[in-house]
Amino acid sequence: MMMPPTTTIKTAKHRTNNRAPQEHVSNDLMMALQDEELADVFLVGSDRDEEPVPACRFVLAARSKVLKRMLYGSFREAKSSTICMMGYDNIVLQAVVEFCYRNDCGEFLINLEMGELGVRKLVQLAKAADYLELPVLHEQAVRVVRARMTKNPNLACAVFDEANTVCQIADYALHIIECRPYVALQSSCDKESVGGGVECLGPDAITCLWKDLRVEAGELFLFRMLRRWFDHAVIKGCKNPAQQVAFECSRFMRLDDIEPTALFAEVTDCQFIASERIFDAVAKQAIRASQERIWSIQCRGRSSVQRVLVEGAGVHNANGIYYRISGLANGDLYSKREVACGQQYVYTLSCNAKDDTYECRLFCSKLLTDRAVLHLEVMQNTSVLDPVFQPVMQVIRVDEPDRHVAAPIRKYYRIHLSDGEFHAKGTLATSLNSLVESNELIGNSVIKVLQYSLYEIEGYAAIHVTAVSIVSSNPGQCFGSPVSISDPATQVTKAKAQSEGDSDHPGGLQSLYSCNYHVDFQARDTTIPRSGWSVEDDGIGPEPTCVWIPAVTKDAHSSS
C-alpha cells in the first residue's frame, strides 16, 4: 500500500528539521564543558599558586587512553577529584583540556608570547601530548616549535634545555645548534625574541653541547660562549655550581686550537681554566708548528675536508665553517649550507687568481633559483625548453592523485613548486612516488629539478617533474611568501618582475666582503688571507677573520 503524499512530505520535513536541534545540542554541550560548576575533576600543575584546571572526566578519558587508564582504572586518581600533573605548568594543562574539548588549542597559541618563555611552554605542551598519547596535539606543538626556532635560531637553546634529550624536538634543536652555532648560541636583540642563546642552557644541556664534536664552531668562539654562560650564572648568584659546570665543559675544549695571542689575552684571566692548561696548549702549538712548517689550527666539524673558519663578521650568518666543495681552474671554492635549519641563503667563499693578484670574496645567494616560475612560464609560451635550466625550488604542497581529473594527470601526485616569490602547479612522475610515500619529499622540501616537461593548466604553465635531487627533506619553513602564478591579483607583480630583466637583477646575489692582495712566491698555507678584508655594499662591519684549516689525513689521525 502506497503511503499518502502528505505523510511523505511530513517525514521529509521532520528529518530536515533534525539538523537544527543537533547544532543546538552541540553548542549546549560546549557551554556545559566550560561551566566550572559542572567540572568533576581538577588538574593541578607545577605552579601551585595558580588555580587548578577544571575539566570533565569523561571527555578527557574519551580523548586519551592514558587519561582513561588514570581516571577509570585502578590508579588512585580514579577515586580522586584532583589529579596532580607536576611536570607541566597550569597553562599547558589548560591547553590540553582545550584540545580535548575542541580538537584544537588555537587560543593557547594566540596568547603565547614569542620569546624564550613561550617556546618552553610549547615544548612542555609537546611533551604532555606525547605522554598522554595525543598525536594530533603533539604534531601541532612540534610544528609551531620548529617554526619559531627556524625564525629565531637562538631559541633552539631554550628548546634543547627544556626538551628530553631523546625526543624529536631536542634532536631538531640540537641540529640547529650544531649547524648554526654562531647564531644559535648568541642571544637575539630582537624585542619579539627576548631570551634564548647560551645563557638559557642548564648544566646538563651545556655540558652535552660542549662534548659534541659536531658543533661547527671554533674553540675561541666556544670559550667566549662558555664564559658568557658563566658570567650570567654569577650574576644570578650561582657562582660555585656554575664554576664546576664550566670547568667540566672546558675539559672537552682543545685550547691548543686557540691562537696564542687570544690564549694570553682572554683565557688567562678565566676562573674555570687552570694556567697549566694554557701553557700546555702553547707547547702543543709550538710542536705542531715545527712539525708542519706552517701555522695551522683545527676546529670541530668534518675534519676530512679542507675548511675555512670565518669569525667576527658583522653579518652574523656569514660566520661559521666553510667546506671546500670543488676546485676551480684558478682558485678554490668553499661553501656553508644550513638548509636543514631553515636558512634560505647559501654562503660562499671563493678565491681566484687574476694576473698577479688573488681576489677573495665572501658572498651569499638565495637557495631557491630566482624567478624560476617566470622562466618556466616563458618556456611554456615559446615551446622551447632550456636544457641546462635545473632550478632549485621548494615544494609548498603535495596532494594525493585526483581521480576526477582526466588521464594521464590523475595518476600523478600533484605539487605546488615555489621560487620564493611565485608558485605554480605541477605533477610528479610515478617513478618519484616512492619519495612521497617514504616522506623524503613533503611540504617545504627543497629540490633541484633535474628533468621536466611543461604543460598547461587553465592557461598557465605547469611543470611535470621526472627527475629530482633532494636538497633538504624539510628545512622547517616555507621560504618567502609565494603567490600563485595563476592568481589574477599577481599579474601586476609579474609584469613588474619581468620588466626589470635579468641584467638589472643579480638573482639574489649579495657580495658581503672582499680581499685582494698581490701574489708572492713565499711558502704559504693557503691563498685565503686571514685579514685585510673590506666591507662590500651589502655587508655590515666589522670585517671577518678567516683561518684556513687543512684536511686531516689518516696519518694525522693515527699519529694523534
Image: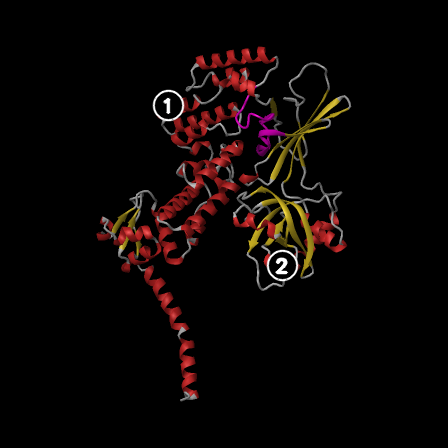
SS at badge 2: helix
Count of marks placed on residues: 2
Please indicate whether residue 296 sits to the left or right of residue 76 in the image: right
In the image, 77 versus 81, the foreground residue is 77
In x, y percent, where is residue 111?
A: 43, 50
In x, y percent, where is residue 171?
A: 46, 38
Residue underneath mark 1: 244
Which residue is depicted at the point 41% across and 87% down?
Answer: 3
Q: Quadrant of the N terminus?
A: bottom left
Please indicate whether residue 222 sits to the left or right of residue 233 in the image: right
Q: Quadrant of residue 337?
A: top right
Relative height, residue 426 to residue 271 (above, below): below
Q: Do the residues under discs 2 and 1 have CB atoms within 8 angstroms?
A: no
Instruction: Tell me if residue 299 can be seen.
Output: yes
Does residue 316 show up magenta in the picture? yes
Which residue is depicted at the point 43% across and 18% down?
Answer: 273
Amino acid type, mark 2? Ile
In the image, 245 versus 337, the foreground residue is 337
